[in-house]
Image (cartoon, rainbow, N blue to C red):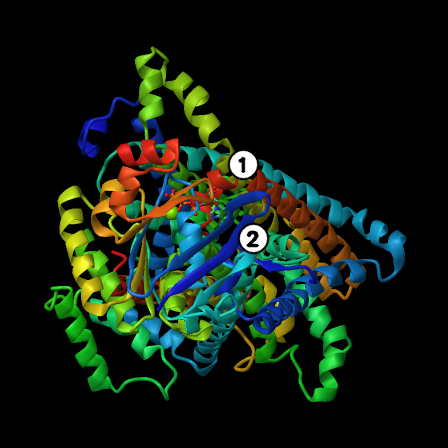
Amino acid sequence: MRAKILRSPSPLPGFGVSFAIMMTALSFVVLLPIGALLGRGFMTGPAELWDMVNSRRIWAALMLSFRAALIASLINLFFGLMLAWVLVRYRFWGRRVIDAAVDLPFALPTAVAGIALSALYAPNGIFGQALAPLGLQVAYTEVGIWVALIFIGLPFVVRTVQPVIGELEPDLEEVSATLGARRAYTLRRVVLPALTPALFSGFALALARSVGEYGSVIFIAGNIPNVTEIAPLLIVIRLEEYNYDAAAAIGIAMLILSFAMLLGINAIQIWSRRRIGLV
Amino acid sequence: MNIDIEDLAKEFGPERALHPVSLSIPSGALIALLGPSGSGKTTLLRILAGLEFPTSGCVRFDGADATGLSIQARRAGFVFQNYALFRHMTVFENVAYGLRAKPRRERPTRAEIDRRVTRLLEMIQLPEIGSRYPNQLSGGQRQRVALARALAIEPRMLLLDEPFGALDARVRKDLRQSLRDIHDRTGLTTVFVTHDQEEAMELADLVVIMSMGRIEQIGKPADIRARPVSDFVRAFTAA
Amino acid sequence: MSDFTPAQTGRATAEPRPVRYLLIGGTTVFVALFLFAPLLTVFTEALADGWRSALAALSLPDARAAARMTLSIAAIAVPLNAIFGLAAAWAIAKFDFSGKAFLITLIDLPFSVSPVVAGLMLVLLFGANSSLGVWLMANDMRVVFAFPGILLATLFVTFPFVARELIPVMIEQGRTEEEAALTLGASGWRTFLTVTLPNIRWALLYGVLLCNARAMGEFGAVAIVSGKIRGKTATMPTMVEMFYNEYLSVAAFSLAAVLAMLALLTLLLKTLLEWRHADLLAATRLH
Ligand SMILES: Nc1ncnc2c1ncn2[C@@H]1O[C@H](COP(=O)(O)OP(=O)(O)OP(=O)(O)O)[C@@H](O)[C@H]1O
Ligand SMILES: [Mg+2]
């Protein structure tokens, strides 16, 4: 195996074993299940699949998952950038606590986040009561889904952008100032373009995660069909009805959606990198 | 524009980068700050540009106190050692940057910007590279683009931190001459930092020798060679 | 928030003071509302009826069974993931073969698959409606609605965690140290244990930490595959959901509080690791 796969020989041992472990694990844990889903789709056939997905309720759910993820990721793009900037560039009391807290959504189980958000924003919750006089309802509306997805996606943006801000050369900002540019102009014309690729990656990661998010959303969403019912929930419902084909159809649609998104975002990223001359 | 530096000191925490130093730079002179690594050359240059604030002392431009003047208002053309070109902009956009950054009232028209950038690119003898990106340039070309960008804002002085530091010996020699030419043509008060004594002696009207945050000697190259004031200067210029 | 100064760039090129205050204030409020408030709520809701009810809820048999389940799953899934991660990083970082980028994409794939879809895949593969599932059942082996299914689901969603931390670190370190050890006569195993492992131990620990947090907290995939059978296949997160849906708020939040404390412990360890080994982890910070 070694000689066939390796491009150049290496004196280090263990390639066969490690490669075999990797490929076995990858095949059984990841590829086989994905294959099962796609295989199911093939057996059903595209026309049938389309028929199964092409219902108002499923479209509404897919659109909702996608739209809410997009909105939440855009909000995260803004606040994540701001947070990363503040954490890298300023020293203030409480900075380290905030820095550590950014990872909370990675560490906290999504179901826990879900019930906590739901308790907060429910009509009798603290935030729910505070927002009610303003005529704002968050729980059981699409806004509630945004809130949950903002929670879930935030660290992706912060953690991708933060190291890049840390490595910005101060020279560039300084030279811009000596050329007479005001601070805002420097930020817009010099700093932002340098951060764009990282912002794209962070946005893409947050988006990919949010589109399929389930645990943190279902408690606060209210799950009203056609209104606040997300696509993953619909899969769960179909499975509970033992309607495997319908569940598989939605699953395939989601898979295609996320792969298309990843592909699109990768393309944009490569394009922007090339334009900026980082490649 | 003449520059007066009076008892300027700079501390970074406990570290003294500059002991009080005083220096008078006559208008239109080409000055070299020469000294070993860590002697405070960059610090002094950055204070002149407004990038660093002195702990005490003051800087005067044409007699007016400039210590509190903002970087933007100083109009100091500053060339960084690694040129600090904007990688996501073409050479043309780099050179035009300072002009486009001006507030709308003072901003030249588009045609005027075009004209000025083209003229500058001709001046640095690179008229054809306007549409290239910095990573498509050689080190020497980058250095000249950085110089053109600094000149575009019609600066009141030119400050260069080891402008030839990252270049090989031959290119260095060529660029030395072109810096001299540009200086003579524009008549700008110019301060450049170097730790190459040959470069300082050959290029500058006046050489300032620094060591450990102090100015050891100020003088014309020939005078410094003939009459070094200390053993340090003798040793350093003999090298 | 009183004594801040801009870091890194000097005062000369920092934002004006009011802007700095605004940015710091804005982010603090944002973090307080979106991150701290939910976290606090978990604890206040758990203690809504006092300590005693919270502790009583935790000693419910269902809660205990769920905790046992979650711990056993993590105890198996995390070491397996670590072994896989080490093997993958060793093969990818230390050897030269084609198709690496594609392989890394495949390893990262579970990140972009919805956990619910992951659970669905396993049900389709091993469930009663597939031929494999029927065969398994005929031979009295259960995957779906049983421990193996939960384990597979957990392995799927945590798949990239350790490998992703290790690959960049090991690529950065190259292979000269291992080659030196080999020329000094060390065996392959010994080289790995005495040269490679010490070099990557912090990154490994970091990956294991994140993997463990996700393994214990996974909800969507596990909820589908486990069938959420109380006392049998329910894990802590799925038990939280069931308590919550039965309006047993204190029980739900008490269990959630335990998970939240685990999360805080994870964050604490992670932060300590990052402070002490910042340079080493710098390469892996891309998460
Ligand atoms: N931002 C800073 N923070 C702390 N100390 C600094 C800073 N900038 C410079 N120093 C210190 O001030 C002293 C003078 O530094 P400076 O950069 O002016 O030296 P230099 O003469 O330009 O040296 P080189 O030839 O190596 O560029 C050094 O001891 C340096 O460590
Ligand atoms: Mg210097």
> Residue A196 location, x and y as percent?
37, 65
Chain bearing tag 2 is C
Residue C199 relative to residue B202: left or right? right
In this rendered view, identify the residue nearer to me: A72 or C62. Answer: A72
Mark 1 belongs to which amino acid? Leu
Residue A239 appears in the figure: no
Residue B80 relative to residue A165: left or right? left
Residue on which the image places disc 1: C205
Mark 2 belongs to which amino acid? Val
Answer yes or no: are tags 1 and 2 on the same subunit. Answer: yes
In this rendered view, identify the residue nearer to me: C129 or A92. Answer: A92
In this rendered view, identify the residue nearer to me: B119 or C95. Answer: B119
Q: Tell me what residue is drawn at x 68 percent, y 41 percent.
A: C68
Rendered-image quadrant of the C terminus of chain B: top left
CA–CA distance in space, label 1 to label 2: 25 Å
> Residue B34 location, x and y as percent?
34, 45
Residue B201 relative to residue A181: left or right? left
Residue on which the image places disc 2: C222
Helix, strand or loop under label 1? helix
